[in-house]
Amino acid sequence: MMEPYIGAVGIAVGIPMCFFGLKMIKPCVCFAGFITLTAVSCLLFYTIYLNDINQTDAFWYFLGGGALAGIIVGLLLAKFLRFGAACLAGWGGFCAGLILNETILFRFE
């Protein structure tokens, strides 16, 4: 349900990044840190509470805590820009490797 909206947001953010890349590196690094830690907190929630479906309160706590930690880490990565850009490049390489593996390399197994 949310996939088309996430894709549209990604395209809307990616086009200015293409033309104004160096000026927008801090917001991009901050956003990537925010999204990554929020996703990790949701993954941690599903790992711990996967058996019990009635833990909606705990889910919102994990999501809120992950978002708060994501904001803090995103701002720290934007402050230390070289380290943040290195983390962003590593994350991009990891995602590119996943895409390559899922589209081409799975045939060689």
Image (tube, rainbow, N blue to C red):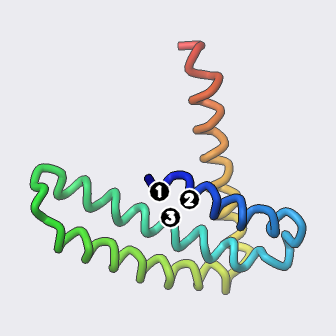
User: Can you give x and y, in whole percent of width and height, for residue 90 in the image?
Assistant: 65, 55
User: Can you give x and y, in whole percent of width and height, for residue 5 in the image?
Assistant: 56, 59
Label 3 vs 2, first from the N-terminus = 2
Q: Secondary structure at mark 1?
A: loop
Dividing the picture into quarters, in which one does residue 29 lie? bottom right
Inter-mark Cα distance, 1 to 2: 6 Å
The residue that appears at 66% across and 81% down in the rendered structure is 78
Label 1 vs 3, first from the N-terminus = 1
User: Can you give x and y, in whole percent of width and height, for residue 87 in the image?
Assistant: 64, 64
Dividing the picture into quarters, in which one does residue 38 lie? bottom left
Inter-mark Cα distance, 3 to 2: 14 Å
* Callouts 1 and 2 close, C-beta under 8 Å: yes
Tell me the kind of residue under disc 3: Thr
Q: What residue is disc 2 on?
A: 6
The residue that appears at 79% across and 76% down in the rendered structure is 24
In the displayed structure, would residue 97 be above or below residue 66? above
* Callouts 3 and 2 close, C-beta under 8 Å: no
Of all residues, the one furthest to the right in this rendering is 19
The residue that appears at 67% across and 53% down in the rendered structure is 92
The residue that appears at 18% across and 51% down in the rendered structure is 50
Toward the viewer: 73 or 53? 53
Toward the viewer: 2 or 104? 2
Tell me the kind of residue under disc 2: Ile
Dividing the picture into quarters, in which one does residue 80 lie? bottom right
Q: What residue is disc 3 on?
A: 36
In the displayed structure, would residue 23 be above or below residue 5? below
User: Can you give x and y, in whole percent of width and height, for residue 34 in the image?
Assistant: 52, 73
Tell me the kind of residue under disc 1: Met
Q: What residue is disc 1 on?
A: 2
User: Quick one: label 2, few (<14), some, or many (20+) residues within 10 Å?
Assistant: few
